[in-house]
Amino acid sequence: MGTFRVTVVIDRPPAEVFAVVAEPRTMPRWYEAVERVVQVNATSYQVTRSLPGGRVDNLVDVAVSDSKDTVTLESRRGPTPFRYRFTMEPEGVGTVLTLDGEISSAGLPGPLEHLDLIATAAFKKGMRQNLEHLRGIVESNDAMA
């Protein structure tokens, strides 16, 4: 399993960033690989992603901190296990959004299954792009549209 960290600064208050990150159904708007998110129960979602090895479905649990500054997404079932912990910290009038990710290429077809280091680097690059996209839509006040 590989780990990575990505940080972006968003020119909006933490509550606005939190509102988007804590609502998994917004993911198709800012997370490029996510095609669809369907709520299964109060804290679980079926997340369909398009990855290099093909389309995958993961059952993802969402945990939100009482302080409304941390959101954790953790796959419970499906290929490509992952755990994403998003932390929002105020900085001036904006927010420092940090993603601490743990991913595995387990479940990908063929030789891709054994490429954790390469998969981690690719996921980190992709998540940086996703968070930059998230920043753009949150700053444009278009995140929940």
Image (cartoon, grey):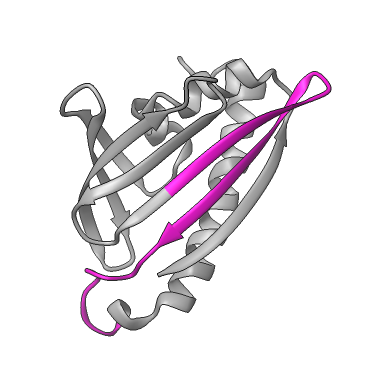
What span is colored magenta in the figure? 84-111
Q: Residue furthest right?
A: 92
Q: Dividing the picture into quarters, in which one does residue 25 lie?
A: top left
Question: Which x, y percent locates residue 72?
Answer: 42, 38
**Figure disc tally:** 0
- Direction from residue 126 to residue 23 in the image, left or right: left
Residue in the foreground of this view, choosing between 7 and 49: 7
Give the x, y percent position of residue 19: 50, 18
Quadrant in the rendering for residue 124: bottom right
Q: What residue is drawn where x is 22% and y is 55%? A: 56
Prevailing secondary structure class for the magenta stretch in the rendered image: strand
> Residue 96 colored magenta?
yes
Give the percent coordinates (x, y) of residue 114.
Answer: 33, 82
Quadrant containing the N terminus in the rendered view: bottom left
- Furthest toward the front, the residue is 66
Residue in view at x 47 percent, y 77 percent: 118
**97 sits to left or right of 22:** right
Where is 103 relative to 83, above or below? below
Percent position of residue 65, x then y: 47, 26
Residue at point 59%, 17% (across, down): 16
Taking the magenta stretch, the answer to whether it contains residue 46 is no
Eyeballing the image, is 54 above or below 96?
A: below
Residue at the location (56% across, 34% down)? 134
Front one among 25 and 81: 81
Specify the quadrant that holds the C terminus.
top left
